[in-house]
Image (cartoon, grey):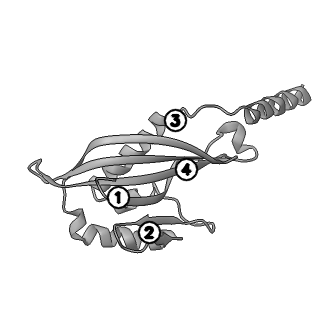
Amino acid sequence: MNKNLLLFLLIMSCISFAEEKPFNDHKKVKKVFLEYIKAVDAKDINKMADYFYYGDSDKTVFHFGDNPPLAIYTKAELMEILSAWKESPRSNFSTTRFDKIDIVPRWDRANAIICTIDAVYSRLNEDGEVINKARTLYHFYRYKNTGVLSFLNKWKPWKIYMVLDLDLES
């Protein structure tokens, strides 16, 4: 009985790996993104940090304007960047209003799914007046779980690995 169950699970696992399925996580990625933006609006840097990937020799990259890119390898580095942002004039807004959100999937690795959110947004003050408009690309990915975890939950959660500010006209 146990051998048959194991054989069945192995065959089903192989079948699911062999099929390339269309990207169907638009809603999940958008939900994670909007939850992250709620943390940004609340200026809750601890919660914001939960949405980023850092560590394990990979890095998170921030590229704001004409400044050189910042590579973040640890949570401590990320918290330092987020703390500086919280104290800067860039965080003097009340809410974020989205004018456009596009989600574009990409498959770059066999065991990862990558997608980009192209967001055009306005930052509003407490009176609901626009104080600035911007466009930012948020790059997300998620890896497959391996081993026994893959039977319980195939994918790890979506994480941001790169943030790029763009000109609004781009």
Q: What residue type is labelled 3?
A: Asp
Earlier sequence position, callout 3 versus callout 1 = 3
Q: In which quarter of the image is the N terminus?
A: top right
Q: What residue type is labelled 2?
A: Leu
Q: Mark 2 points at which residue?
A: 78
What kind of element bears circle 2?
helix
| Spatial separation of the CA atoms under disc 3 and disc 1 | 25 Å
Earlier sequence position, callout 2 versus callout 3 = 3
Count of numbered tags: 4
Query: In the image, is 37 to the left or to the right of 6?
Result: left
Image quadrant of residue 70?
bottom left
Query: In the image, is 42 to the left or to the right of 161?
Result: left
Q: Mark 1 points at which residue?
A: 166
Q: Which amino acid does label 4 sit on?
A: Tyr
What kind of element bears circle 3?
loop
Up the image or down, 78 lies above or below 165; here it is below
Which residue is nearer to you in this view: 74 or 105? 105
Disc 4 + disc 1, Cβ < 8 Å = no
Q: Which residue lies furthest to the front in this view?
A: 169
Q: Name the residue under label 4.
A: 141
Residue depth check, mark 4 versus mark 2: number of the one nearer the observer: 4
Query: Residue 136: percent from the left, percent from the top?
Result: 36, 54
Image quadrant of residue 90?
bottom left
What kind of element bears circle 4?
strand
Q: Mark 3 points at which residue?
A: 25
User: What residue sits 74% from the left and 36% below the top?
Assistant: 17
Q: Residue furthest left?
A: 127
Query: Residue 87: percent from the left, percent from the top?
Result: 25, 71
Up the image or down, 7 lies above or below 154; here it is above
